[in-house]
Image (cartoon, grey):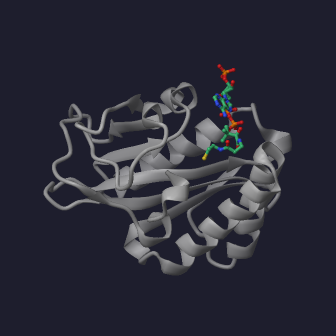
Amino acid sequence: MQFSADYSGRLPEIAEHFRAVFSASEGDSEGDLIAALVQEMFASTADPDLSAFTALEDGSIAGCILFTRLSYEQDSRSAFLLSPVAVRTQRQGQGIGQALIRHGLTAVRQHGADVAVTYGDPSYYGKTGFRQITESQAAAPLPLSHPHGWQAQSLTGAELAPLRGPSRCVPALNNPVYW
Ligand SMILES: CC(C)(COP(=O)(O)OP(=O)(O)OC[C@H]1O[C@@H](n2cnc3c(N)ncnc32)[C@H](O)[C@@H]1OP(=O)(O)O)[C@@H](O)C(=O)NCCC(=O)NCCS
């Protein structure tokens, strides 16, 4: 297993990876939705606001995660949102997701991120250091349909003090269907 932050030349393969994984877990329409989201994230996000990490096995994608900037304009800290996450269906439950998330968190911290935020199942993301938060600790960019899935962690070792002000996600995620 090899981790890579270089997604150049792999965008169609990454979109297909998300389509296949989410089609298998949640149906074809969800697969199409997430593949389109990922394509839009790559197409419309400024380079400094996007990081993608792949787990490669024999040169093909076994897992992929994306981080995009979550801006809190009244706060000097740099926050990134981890979403989406997908591990190849046949390789799920074997530690790839957690290893890839840990790798990605270390890499974004080394590039200056102070806080990582995510939105999903706390019983899964809790395994890689995320803790449930309320919107008084960090405002979500759009109304949350599952507020219990709102989670964050400090990447600096400092306690996670509330993030100040309203937040803004990247344009590709600025759609209520994802929240
Ligand atoms: C969710 C997902 C990324 C986890 O990756 P993975 O490589 O299968 O998970 P790992 O092997 O690292 O971790 C396995 C552990 O997480 C738990 N887990 C796996 N998927 C889970 C889920 N969807 N919800 C809660 N817990 C989950 C397992 O029960 C297991 O727990 P254990 O270690 O106590 O036995 C992967 O299953 C996947 O791609 N699922 C389909 C797409 C998806 O739901 N993505 C997340 C939303 S963006």
Image side of residue 69 versus residue 176, left or right: left
Quadrant hosting residue 12: bottom right
Q: Is residue 61 visible?
A: no
Asked if 105 appears above or below 93 in the picture, the reply is below
Residue 88 image offset from top left, x and y in percent: 78, 48
Q: Where does residue 18 sit, x and y in percent of width and height?
A: 72, 58
Residue at image x 75%, y 32%? 94
**Which residue is drawn at the image coordinates 39% and 45% (left, top)?**
117
Regarding ligand 1, which quadrant of the image does it lie in? top right
Task: Return the residue nearer the eye: 177 or 7.
Answer: 177
Where is residue 120 shown, x and y percent of the image? 53, 39
On screen, residue 10 above or below 160: below
Relative height, residue 151 to residue 60 (above, below): above
In this view of the protein, which residue sits in the foreground, 92 or 165?
165
Instruction: Provide residue 141's location: percent of width, then percent of height.
Output: 35, 55
Q: Which residue appears at 28% of the width and 47% of the height?
A: 139
Report if residue 89 is visible in the image: yes
Query: Would you place residue 69 above or below residue 55 in this image?
Result: below
**Towards the viewer: 44 or 102:** 44
Residue lying at the far right in this picture: please name it. 90
